[in-house]
Image: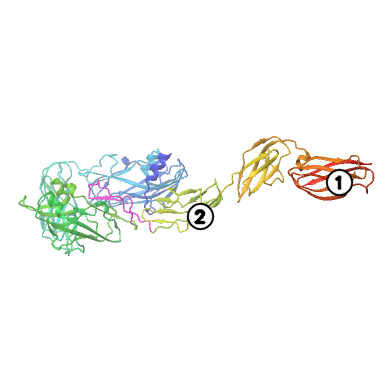
Amino acid sequence: MNKFYLLLTALCVSFYANVSGQCTPDGSVTSGVSPSSSAVPCADRTAAFSQTFTFVVPSSLGITTVKFDSITNLPSGLTYAFNQNPAEYAAGSRGCFIVSGTPGASVPCGQYKTRIYVTITSSFVGTVKGPMDSIATAAGISGFDPIYIRVKDIAGVCPTINNNNQAFTADATCGIAAGGAPIVTTTASTGIAQTTADLNGIVNPNGLTTAVSFEWGLTTSYGNTATPSPSSLVGANGINVTASVNGLQPSTLYHFRVKGVNTSGTTNGNDLTFTTLAPQTAGNCTANPNQVTLFEPLPDQIACIRKGQAYNEVMYINFTTIANQVSFDSVRIDSLGNMPAGINAYPNQVDKTYRATESGCIQITGTSNADCGQYKFKIYVTIWTSFSPNPIKGELYDIATSFGFGGAVPQYYHRVTACPAPTCPALDASQTVAFVPAAICTNPGALVLPIITTTGVTTFCQGNSVKLSAGNNYTSYEWSNGSTDSTATATTSASYNVTVSNGCETGSAAAPVAVTVKPTPTAAFTGTGNVLTATPAVANYKWVRNDTIIPGATSQTYTITQGGDYSVIVTLGGCSDTSAVRTLTYTFVGVEEIAGIKNLTLVPNPANSFITVRASVAGSTVNEITLHDIVGRAIQTILVNHASGSSFEHKIDLSGISNGTYFIQVNTEKGKVTRSFVKN
């Protein structure tokens, strides 16, 4: 279960759900998602597409509800909708969603792996978020395999499903058999500068030798032609082609398309546009003359671009480092390619040209609403060097790699996120593609600070605890006692707080919880003879014999009167502890020993006119001697004060009493000792 929990919690992703759609669940579906990918027809470019999927929410593993957050990686032009809004379904219930729309003529053909993101509430592991197929695989639940949607040309044949787990698998033929007219697709322009741009496309010669060219101009009438190198292609797979154009006007919209011609016909690609950069002034940055590295900051230190927020970053370049690797005269920064929309770059020199001994900087600024993800940053340059008769043109990183000093020129990326806080997604330098979409692109809004709740009282005796909770609405937790769960257990006196994150911002509870732990006394007792003494000295006590509290035995000391299993309950400040149980044997003690009187004698006995009381005092003080008649009435009381450790002798006048039997009682602070005598 721990492995399952860790895997599920690692798949933490949050999205916004779509609106409800017009679909009816298929009552014959009893588990999983249906139909499977192989039973879903292809979506034809330029043709309407609609497919209903029915699902049954599992009821195993303690699942109570499943909320469908989003469906991603659909082909462009297709959208989704669930049969209820919000798309939240109870365990064991049946629902559906419909995928519909019309893919455009420029939508790349191939297989798209859709991702269905869900939030699962389970009594076993709490709340789990992530891709439905990944969670189901981890939990061992069948029937929730990935859903693949295929796109082809309207005249093509639908290819077989390829369960390769790839986000997109291109089909350059678009389902059309080889030997026909070329299959061409115009793709986005790159390297856009004020007066230059690179035109791109994909051409499948369809098994025949095919001539390739680009048409471009201010309108869809084009009027200009650019030829890529090579301009003649063979084969049956899609081939990327690029042609550079120059002499363009700054701040101008241009149209372009790729064109393929072979013996079976001519195919014109879809029309795309680009806008050249505006006339550029020098960037508002100052080069660092003391810079020793080639680039600063390092790639992973480039700040994230926040959607809708102003961005400003400066890159410092030391061209001397390049000159140490390969000799050159000067470098001109022609443009910065693959920039997120709305972000511009301005070198600090108007001519953007730097000698081999110079340092420079580039100010990167603007406000972007581009798609979230990682953009591969490209610096296009022209290099003049003595070992080449012609200037070297291209992307700086690619040039450096081709000359064998790629390590000196790091590959940079721009990361775009929707989060408002300074937390930036980790850089993935292993990616070589121009754009890697972000898994998380929702803005969770302003962080709502947690309110700590407690299960139990916050003042308690040592050995107990209280559970603190911050709720399940956050992606991470850090308690002041080190716990990283949504809950923490407090066992010591302290002020407890928690720092949480919603994936973007972090914050702590405004009201920490104070916990007070009161010390619990350690109960024990000692005994000499029949007298027991409890510790600690200042407390409340209850003596126990044979698991029963002794009524009235609430003093620190207790004198046993019979054998048994004894213990003492000690309470201090509301906290109690019970001592160990001891089995004790009662030792008989005489009355004299209890009272602290030894050798009490009356002489003479029988007596006439007087009688003498003699005794030794040990461990007590004699305070009075009382003369009683045969029925117990006190006839005479004599106050005395004989201290412990002494012997005493006291003579009592009997002349005033009649003959008979009488009692003399010696009273001490611990007890009473009585002797009888006869008066004649």
Residue located beneath label 1 in the image: 651
Q: Is residue 306 above or below residue 622?
A: below
Residue located beneath label 2 in the image: 514
Relative image position of residue 296 (x, y in whole percent) = 22, 55
Give the alpha-carbon distance from disc 1 to disc 2, as whole Å: 72 Å
Relative image position of residue 351 (x, y in whole percent) = 13, 62
Q: Amino acid at mark 2?
A: Ala
Q: Main secondary structure of the magenta part?
A: loop
Instruction: Please state which of residues 252 and 293 is positioned toward the viewer in this rendering.
Output: 293
**Looking at the rendered structure, which numbered label has been put on residue 614?**
none
Q: Is residue 470 above or below residue 60?
A: below
In-image side of 624 versus 609 (left or right): left
In-image side of 377 versus 22 (left or right): left
Secondary structure under tag 1 reads strand
- Residue span colored magenta: 422-445
In-image side of 630 versus 301 (left or right): right
Q: Is residue 259 magenta?
A: no
Relative image position of residue 248 (x, y in whole percent) = 12, 60
Relative image position of residue 10 (x, y in whole percent) = 37, 45
Q: Amino acid at mark 1?
A: Lys
Secondary structure under tag 2 reads strand
Determine crowd level at label 2: few under 14, some 14-19, many 20+ residues with C-alpha closer than 10 A: few
Residue 272 can be seen in this image: no
- On the image, which quarter does residue 588 sit in? top right
Determine crowd level at label 1: few under 14, some 14-19, many 20+ residues with C-alpha closer than 10 A: few
